[in-house]
Image: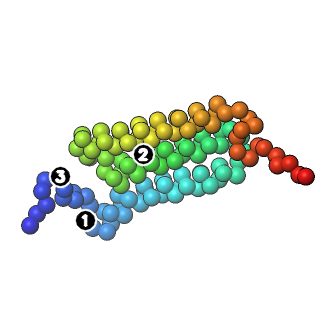
Amino acid sequence: MTAPHGLAEAGPRSTRDILRATLPLWLALMLLLAATLGLAYVPLGRWSAAVAFGISGVKTVLIGVFFMKLRDAIPLVRIAACAAMLWLAFLFLLTFADLLTRAPLTQPGTIVPSMG
């Protein structure tokens, strides 16, 4: 019995083809992981989180396009993935707006406990 059109795997079949298709992507993800780890020790100040989120965004796009095969997906699946990313970006925007508009003394970790 064959799978319905659109559900069958149309990718590489041999081990060599699978490695040829996934090894460069895996190496790119490992380089981005090393960049994330290396930048964790670089004092970037307020830009630290922005750089880390940028790197994680690149990793997310690579995984979505290649491993989840969004490049070859039907338009409805692409729209659903874009809607999910848009919603996630909106939630991040609200979170960062909240953190950036708080008064300095109300942010966690800035209030010194009184001794006495």
Residue located at (36% from left, 51% from top): 66
Q: Position of residue 26 (x, y in %)?
A: 45, 58
**Would you name the residue on which mark 2 appears?**
61
Mark 1 to mark 2 CA distance (whole Å)? 25 Å
Q: Position of residue 46 (x, y in %)?
A: 68, 38
**Would you name the residue on which mark 1 appears?**
13
Kind of element beneath mark 2:
helix
Task: Compare residues 82 and 37 and report the one nearer the observer.
Answer: 82
Q: Indicate which label's residue lies in the foreground, 1 or 2.
A: 2
Disc with the residue nearer the chain's start (1 vs 2): 1
Is any atom of residue 67 visible in this view? yes
Instruction: Check disc 3 and give the amino acid type.
Output: Gly
**Would you name the residue on which mark 3 appears?**
6
Label 2 neighbourhood size at 10 Å, few (<14), some (14-19), many (20+)?
Answer: some
Mark 1 to mark 3 CA distance (whole Å)? 17 Å
Horizontally, residue 79 falls left or right of residue 50, namely left
Give the answer, above or below, for where 19 lies relative to 91: below
Label 3 neighbourhood size at 10 Å, few (<14), some (14-19), many (20+)?
Answer: few
Mark 2 to mark 3 CA distance (whole Å)? 22 Å
Which residue reaches farthest right?
A: 116
